[in-house]
Structure formats: structure tokens, C-alpha cells
Image: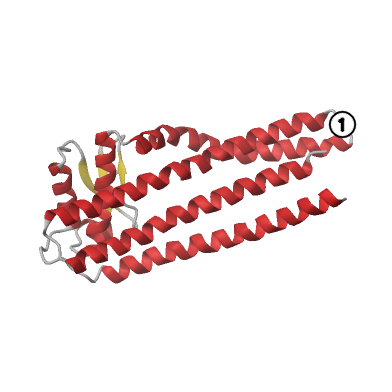
Amino acid sequence: MFFGSVNTYLELILYILFLLALVIAAIAQLKVSLTFRRYSRVHVSTGKTAAEVAREILDENGITDVRIERIGGNLTDHFDPRDGALRLSDGVYDSDSAAAIGVAAHEAGHAIQHAKGYLPIVIRSKLVPITNIASRLSWIFVLIGVLIMGLAEFAYEFSNFGYIVALIGVGLFSVTTLFQLVTLPCEFDASHRAMQTLRASGEFSSQELRASRKVLSAAAMTYVAALLVSIIQLLRIFAMVKRDKR
């Protein structure tokens, strides 16, 4: 009875923490949008667009086989190593704002990471297909395992088998958490490379650099929040499986 109460309280605490983490993630995402919008009004004195700056950064690092393309959406910017394309969203591509240039330089930083074989980005790339599969299957295994454990009331021998199936689901979900963890150094390093490159160019004022840094710092917090959500969700799933084991 005592351990049952402890487990109940633990699950309640994890549920509350999960909700708080979701709120933090939502606030972080909102802050990115507001920060980008604010510093989109800070135009760089050079008049160069984000696409032009990204091209210059790539060329300076000897990366001539990466295309810069426009992509629809809001802040959908990303580097795709499979297609060799750095894609900038409509609000970034031809903008000469410090916010847009910061985002473009960040994505160029990812291209440099791939070109230089930066270890975390190599690991992250290898995890992408595994994570895609694991994220789809994790809840299926957990729910099937819990269902089988529920049948233990009628056939006790099912309990251990169901527990193993559910634990496989927990293990699969942990892959997504690992992916979020590996993503952090990739994002922080790309932002560091971006600011270092922009500063070294000598083309941007301290105010412009500060605006770019503010946008990248706000974006980085979304990845921290995503990792927090994933960790707490993993603990919640594990606690749920342990509770249902008879």
C-alpha cells in the first residue's frame, strides 16, 4: 500500500512537471517568434541579404557544392545534407535584417559542421532514420505491453511478457530523448560558429551583432525546452509501465 501511494505521487509529480515543461516549450517558441520579429526591424548597414551572407560564409569555408534555396513557411530554415541544400524561409531569404542574417549564418554553421565532420552532427545524422522509426513504434509497444499486462488478471503468465514489450517501447522512446540530447551541442555550436563568422567579417556593427545573437539565443532555448519535455515524458512512460506491472 505504501509503495502504491509513492508510485501514485511520483506519477502525479511527473505529470505536473510534464505540463510545466510543455508550458516552458510553448513560451520558448513564442519568444523566438517575438524576438525575430523585433530584430527584423534592425537592418544591417551593408544592405546584404541573408542569402548573400550565407553564400559568402559557405564560400569562405570552401563549401561550394551547397545550394541556397528559398522555402515556404515561417522560420522553416534548415540545412539538408542529403540534398546539399541550405534552405531559407520567405522571411529570411532576401531580408537584410540582423535577425535574418543571424538565422542564415546559423544554418551555414550546420553546413560547416557537416563539411568538417563535427562529431555530434555526425552522430545526429546517423540517429535521424533510427529516431524516425523509434518515435513511431515507441507508443505502440508501450500500449500493447500495458494491454498484455492488463490481461494478467486472467492469465498471470502474460504479465512478464507484457512488461518486456512495454520496456521495449520505453527503450525506443529513449532514442528520441537521445536525439534531443545530441541536438543540443549541434545547435549551440552552429550558433557559436555563426556569431564568430559574422564578428570576424568586420562588416557588422555591435548593435547588429547583438540583434543576431539575441535571435539565436532565443532559438537555442527551444531545443533546451524540447529536451526537457522529452526527458520528463520518458520518465512518465517508465513510471506508467512500472505501475501496471503486476
Q: Residues within 10 Å of mark 1 (few under 14, many from 20)?
A: some
Vertical comparison of 147 with 192: above or below: above
Residue behind mark 1: 156
Seen in the image, is 91 located left or right of residue 205?
right
- Which kind of residue does numbered mark 1 sit on? Tyr
Instruction: Give the mark count.
Output: 1
244 vs 96: above or below:
above
Up/down of 201 relative to 26, above or below: above
Q: Position of residue 95 (x, y in %)?
A: 20, 62
Q: Is residue 87 visible?
A: no
Please name the residue shown 60% across and 51% down the image: 232
Find residue 184 and report its horizontal and vertical position in percent.
41, 47
Q: Secondary structure at mark 1?
A: loop
Q: Does residue 197 appear in the picture of this structure?
A: yes
Drawn side of residue 211 relative to residue 187, left or right? left
Residue 15, percent from left and from top:
66, 57
Q: Quadrant of the C terminus?
A: top right
Query: Residue drawn at (25%, 65%), measured in percent from left and top?
Result: 210
Q: Is residue 228 left or right of residue 7?
A: left
Quarter where residue 91 is shown: bottom left
